[in-house]
Image (tube, helix red, strand yellow):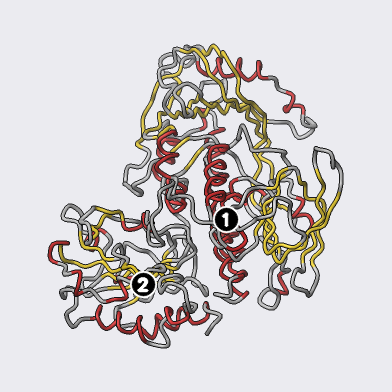
Amino acid sequence: MQFHHHGYVSGDPRVQPAAGVGIDRPEELPNEVDVLIVGSGPAGMLTAAQLSQFPGITTRIVERRENRLEIGQADGIQARSVETFQAFGFAERITAEAYWITEMAFWRPDTENPTNIIRGGRAVDDATGISEFPHLIVNQARVLDYFAEVMANSPTRMSPDYGLEFHSMVVANDGDYPVAVTLTQVGGPNDGQERTVKAKYVVGCDGARSKVRASIGCTMAGDQANHAWGVMDVVAKTDFPDIRTKCAIQSNDGGSILLIPREGGHLFRMYVDLGVVAEDSKGAIRKTTIEQIIAKANAILTPYTLDVRNVAWHSVYEVGHRLTDRFDDVLPDSIGTTTPRVFITGDACHTHSAKAGQGMNVSMQDGFNIGWKLAHVLEGRSPESLLSTYSAERQVVAKNLIDFDKEWSTLMAKKPEEFEDPSELEDFYVRTAEFPAGFMTEYTPSMITGDATHQDLATGFTVGKRFKSAMTRRVCDTNPIHLGHHATADGRWRIYVFADAAPAGSPSGVTDLAEWLSNAPESPLAVTPEGADVDAWFDVKVIYQQPHQDVDFNAVPAVFKPDVGPFALTNYEKVYATDPKSDIFEERGLSRDGVVVVVRPDQYVANVLPLAATDELAAFFAPLLSAR
């Protein structure tokens, strides 16, 4: 964390000085806003947290509830989400309070006594070391609290506007604020009162029954699996030995359980198999009582017993897989000619089972994707065409998620005798671990993701996939640093320059590139607004092949140590070297001749280029920069 560059800071450095719309921010929702976010779930709060970093943009987030969420239904936090939390500054704190999933146990009927279950196997959660971050369990409400803290501490001093329900919306063809949203007051002295707010853009994060989705004419298509599950968060006395380990439990004839321990050491969640639902049941399964769910769980756990002492929350749901045909308000025949004004995220556009722990995680990545794009367009950094990439990118991700979840939920519902091999469920879990962890997303070439022409120069940084961090040494203070951990959610593009073998400052490809970045009119840095820090839009870092002791900091080109802040202080934290215990060039398959890796503001690799490919670098950024 960097601070003091504007002068001495004696308080919490996470609290940024109020600026722009954060100065004298009105408590009441204005009549006109740049972005109106509907719904304060994970996707909505992440989108708001991202936009809160831009003090010139008026963003408000409305929520039907009258106050913060107290009990959330989602709890699984995949490693990709923890990477995202790192960018927002709270990964370490939420990790400390969460439950860590390190293994999963698989229980199945005892072949000698099928009425009893036995542990049939274990699987390490991240056997291949795909991420340095753990797989966590923590209540959704706490995730929202952390994003609310980011918003409150941001320059815009943002906070949710509670007690306002989306009623209807009209999108006009022109005007500065073309989207008119009618909201209804919920609770308080003005209960039921309607008001209209006009916005430049609207983001619907209002769940599976989304009114925003309905207002733009989107419908969800898919199927019901006609299989029901009872879910409960409870504390209990039990002799089941793996009650604090994530488990898939299959009984002989009583169904199955997915057991997920919760944070705090005592609470746990169980998804309890309630069986096939008849098509003409008219929703009768939803009347299943908590006592019936507990009894079913005890039957599955035989010979072990479960004495539930307290129920924090419970529900019954039927597995369904649904997807909308588009994630914005632009009809198919208007794509490329019409600017989207309304976007939907999360459950508003994709629904599936809860047992793969994907809902909250994928929804947050929806929010991360659209958040920075809206900011760049509203600030004038990028053309409006950037916004069309949201639906194009995220719909594919949602489709892949639903395909995966269909297979996983089908396996979870199988009876033991239906498996060709008793370890089939365990094998599937291990084989597909990268997908639920959040790391299979791979964006295809577009205006913000290049092709893989030079992929051989950086085989460990796949174009279109998330930037997988690795250890380095920061030259200025010799500290071991995960390179990706300094990429904060500030909306900047990252340009990582992995140096050739020449010493810092000597004639080399790095020196030539640095000169071009600093002075060429075609350089992306040339569009940085006058009066802003030179790294305000582009965060440029260099990683040398030599050990940190052999890097002469004074010889490093100026573009990698820019002057920042009102006192024009040197930013020392952009110059890195290899770590003696972990050579990033070797670990990530980086060319010893040097390579440039461009990373999007949402942490996905956008391009891989040779050091000398300045023309290609300029050509990549040219369509993205409105000033060009």
Q: What secondary structure is marked by label 1?
A: helix
What residue does disc 2 label?
608
Q: CA distance from mark 2 to mark 1?
A: 24 Å
Give the x, y percent position of residue 97.
44, 33
Q: Quadrant location of residue 340?
A: bottom right
* In the image, residue 53 above or below residue 532: above
Query: Callout 2 environment at 10 Å: few (<14), some (14 to 19), or many (20+)?
Result: many
Query: Callout 1 environment at 10 Å: few (<14), some (14 to 19), or many (20+)?
Result: many
Q: Quadrant location of residue 589?
A: bottom left
Q: What secondary structure is marked by label 2?
A: strand
Name the residue located 43 percent from the left edge and 25 percent from the top edge: 107
* In the image, residue 101 above or below residue 153: above
Q: Nearer the viewer, residue 133 or 327?
A: 133
Q: Nearer the viewer, residue 304 or 553?
A: 553
**Residue type at mark 2?**
Val
**Residue type at mark 1?**
Asp
Q: Which numbered disc covers residue 366?
A: 1
Find the residue positioned furthest to the left. 550
Q: Quadrant location of residue 224?
A: top right
Name the residue located 55 percent from the left edge and 32 percent from the top edge: 414
Find the residue positioned furthest to the bottom. 521
Give the x, y percent position of residue 480.
24, 52
